Image (cartoon, coloured by chain):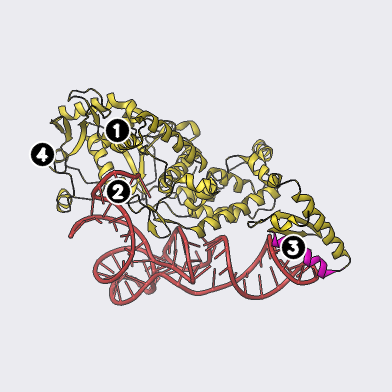
Amino acid sequence: MTDIYLYNTKTRTKGQQFTPIDDKNVRMYVCGPTVYDRAHLGNARPVIVFDVLNRLLRHVYGDKHVTYVRNFTDVDDKINARAAESGRSIGYITDETIQWFLDDMGAVGAIEPDHMPRATAYIAPMVAMIEDLIAKGHAYAAEGHVLFSVSSYAEYGALSGRSMDDMIAGARVEIAPYKRDPMDFVLWKPSDADTPGWDSPWGRGRPGWHIECSAMAHDLLGAQFDIHGGGNDLTFPHHENEIAQSKCAGHDFANVWLHNEMLQVEGKKMSKSLGNFFTVRDLLDQGVSGEVIRLVMLSTHYRKPMDWTETKRKEADNTLSDWISVLQKHGYCAKTVEMLKAAGDWTADVELMGVLGNDLNTPGALARLHVLSKGRTAEALAPFAHGLETLGLVSDWSAVEASASERDDLADWIAPVIDRLLVERSTARADKNWGEADRLRDLLNASGVQVTDIAGEASWAQGPDFDPSVLEALK
RNA sequence: GGCGAGUUGGUAGAGUGGUUAUGCAGCGGAUUGCAAAUCCGUGUACACGAGUUCGAUUCUCGUACUCGCCUCCA
């Protein structure tokens, strides 16, 4: 059994071993996207980080003993604005964006959570929770709004390590006449005729952002659950507010809080305001595979800022090709894996899982994969292959086999031309006509074809700069 | 202004109170007609200052610098 240690933002340590409330139902909630546009690369980081944790938990506690919830915020002013400017309906935009998100995150190897609640489907529980908070004296209605009274919760600020005085000192909070305290935040706000709204005891309106997660987590995971995750930009105010709402409603809420660090691009913060962001789909369209994106993400620990660079992209591409070719060399395909499983040889590497269990040390796990990849036989490579699957870097073993015959995509005339040149070359080599042999090899190299001689047998493969036009003249 | 994180060899990036991270690049070797590919070997790095210690890159304090959050964002 792999022990798991997680750095808990709440205690700022990773000292204690993770122990689920119920090891037959380990529960995790992660804040999902507000669905108004394509996910940018930064959005993919928490998805991948918590996907790895989800896979680890399932490995340790069993696939059926983990419940993973990630929400969709489908009611939000950004969505309203997008709808207004595009002339499309809100429903159209949210449906479309959700599908984009699922496609893009699927491409980077993320397993879909067990539940993906949409906020708009949970308005009733939110209203009920708000009513409860009012009844308990933690919230108040004013001018069609309902506000959470921050001063009613003494622990406010504990997660993010801020005192009320700190927050007021640097306050950049919205001042509104209906607020009793500038720090109070909105649980419910009124909607006008053009804005989505639901009937409530406080008139037609819509929920505030923070109450969504509190209500959905409670509805799907219960009053107390194991892990709550998200980006560290959500620590304050979003998670702080979730805690305040849920605790004041009498829920114990999350035991362990995990936060991933932010993503940068070529050393600079990726942000909408700086305009240097790009989407996951942009990368996929450029031919960067989801596995490469994932490998780059895993190469930095989740609690450190990660820098996306072109250099890393290339290195990840090379590493992945190397690993796949190792597996191909030993005949890995769906059937091989099946046979290994039948023979009981499909087992996890204990060291790899231990490293991963140590606060999701994915760079350490990748280092271990490099070591495991040196296996000399299909059996010896089983822990390596198993590790690749656990980390989500390989999902389809039949695809590993298929990529060996990538040259099928080439135009019909190319392979015969290359084969003919290789035959001519081996004739020249047999005659010790090195000048001619090297001329032919240089020619192939110039077209981006890699020539490999093993035990006197020549073979070829498409290199990264493959350019068939050089061979065109030799048709 | 407040809160928080970080500073490791050419580079990316883990980790550890004394003993090999790992990848890429480099260098040396095996192999090769020569290469490529492959394999083997190789680097003695932990911002600065002080303290604790038999011993600190690893713990404590301070300094410098970088970055993030506090505002829509993951």
How far is disc 3 from disc 4 in space, using C-alphas? Answer: 77 Å
- The residue tagged 2 is A11
Disc 1 marks a residue whose amino acid type is Glu
Q: Which residues are magenta?
A: A432-447
Disc 3 marks a residue whose amino acid type is Leu
**Residue A39 vs residue A334: left or right?**
left
Pointers 3 and 4 in contact (CB under 8 A)? no
In the rendered structure, which disc, 2 or 4, sits on the residue that comes first in sequence?
2
In the rendered structure, which disc, 4 or 1, sits on the residue that comes first in sequence?
4
Q: Position of residue A76 (x, y in %)?
A: 30, 35
**Residue B47 vs residue B26: left or right?**
left
Disc 2 marks a residue whose amino acid type is Thr
Say yes or no: labels 4 and 1 on the same chain.
Answer: yes
Residue A443 is tagged as: 3
* Badge 4 density bin: few <14, some 14–19, many ≥20, Cα 10 Å: few
Tell which subunit mark 3 falls on.
A
How far is disc 2 from disc 1 in space, using C-alphas? Answer: 25 Å
The residue most toward the right is A431
Residue A212 is tagged as: 1
Residue shown at 39% from the left, 54% from the top: A276
